[in-house]
Amino acid sequence: MQFLILFVIGTAVGLLGARLMRVDLGTLPNIAVGIIGTIFGLLVLRMIPAVLGLVAGLIAAFVATLILFWAYKRFMEGRGPR
């Protein structure tokens, strides 16, 4: 059950993050980045026990996904480190 919730949150966050960051990888890669971002965000939250709750988890998942999309744009679209 928790995997299904993770998948749904990751899908939503991936698609929304791709639109916000104006990255077009395709539907499945956007979803994959969202799921990876969600996992990363939830792992970070587990390290901070004071921050609990579903809303905090959604925010962390969204921020982690935006960071992944930013890194993709920076390093994979020809805007590498200077």
Image: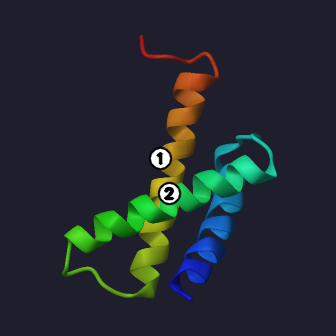
**Residue 82 picture location, percent across and down:** 42, 10
**Contact, mark 1 vs mark 2 (Cβ under 8 Å):** yes
**Residue 22 picture location, percent across and down:** 71, 42
Q: Quadrant of the N terminus?
A: bottom right
Quadrant position of residue 41: bottom left
Q: Amino acid at mark 1?
A: Ile
Q: Residue at x 60, y 67 (%)?
A: 10
Report how far apart the C-alphas of labels 1 and 2 lie in the structure: 8 Å
Mark 1 or 2, closer to the camera: 2
Q: Residue at x 33, y 65 (%)?
A: 43
Q: Furthest-right residue in view?
A: 26
Quadrant position of residue 76: top right
Q: Residue at x 50, y 57 (%)?
A: 37
The scheme the figure's colours follow is rainbow
- Residue, disc 2: 37
- Going by the image, does 73 lie left or right of 47? right
Secondary-structure class at tag 1:
helix
Q: Residues within 10 Å of mark 2 (few under 14, many from 20)?
A: many
